[in-house]
Image (cartoon, grey):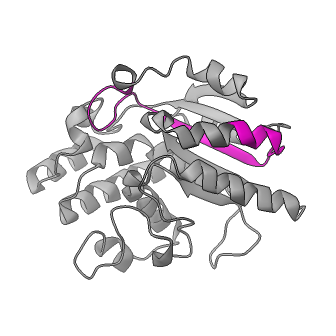
Amino acid sequence: MKAIATNIRKTILQMANASKSPHVGSALSCADIISTLYFKVLNITNPIQDHRDYFILSKAHSAMSLYSTLYEKGFMSKEDIDGYYQNDGTLPAHTDRDTSDFIEISAGSLGHGLPMALGIANSIKLKEESNKVFVLMGDGEMQEGSVWEAAMLAPKLGLDNLTIFIDHNNLQGYGRATELVEFYPVKEKWESFGWDTYVIDGHDYDEIEQTANIQSDKPKAIICNTVKGKGVPFMEDELIWHYFIVTDEIKEKALKELS
């Protein structure tokens, strides 16, 4: 998993450099979560099947992390990756479900992923099927009211097939999430809404896998303590990498750090 995640991070850096696009820190933050899900947890194959597990990237500004994981998994081509955020290209900066069978939703406006995942999970329940739904959210995303509307409804519907991962790096576009809007205590909040809740190291592949596979009769919330820019020391926990561009010089320096 370490080698896989490192390859994914290298692809993220190359995509960010080629496209001159932002959000590299956000993508690096959640790379370990997404890679572990696709390589260790999700029941999903290529070609895609109707009966599959669903992964919903709600913090869709981290799309490079998902695209790079799908590429590493063999679910996207080099041509797809090279066309990221280019004129007449292949993949947009925020996910668009029409670009690939493996992109489940169009997203970008934060707070929408969990409500949509709730609908998918409920439809699976109504059909009495066994597949599961996994959602990745940002911690700043918890400032959205739609998140808490869905959080109240999911236990009421008995959605034990729904799991969310919260990328808790405490940095969002304009500063520390906790300084902009106070949302602690996070674990106790989700528990009070009726979720089975865990706090883990969001860069520990074994812990991510084991917690994702815990059986529960409730929806699960997994709060992943992460570091924005993880894997590239000069980018780690630095707000500027929410928006700063990866130049050729920065790319070479970052790839050297990863190697």
Q: Is residue 191 above or below residue 155?
A: above
Which residue is more in the foreground, 3 or 148?
148
Residue 153 falls in image quadrant: top right
Magenta residues, start to end: 152-177
Q: Is residue 28 above or below residue 87?
A: above
Q: For residue 219, say whether it is visible.
A: no
Q: Residue at x 60, y 36 (%)?
A: 148
Q: Position of residue 53 (x, y in %)?
A: 70, 60
Left/right of residue 113 with respect to residue 82 in the rendered view: right
- Farthest right residue in view: 128
Q: Position of residue 8 (x, y in %)?
A: 40, 55
Q: Position of residue 104 (x, y in %)?
A: 57, 66
Q: Is residue 67 above or below residue 185?
A: below
Q: For residue 58, say whether it is visible.
A: yes
Which residue is more in the foreground, 79 or 59?
59
Label tally: 0
Q: Residue at x 37, y 58 (%)?
A: 64
Does 206 appear in magenta?
no
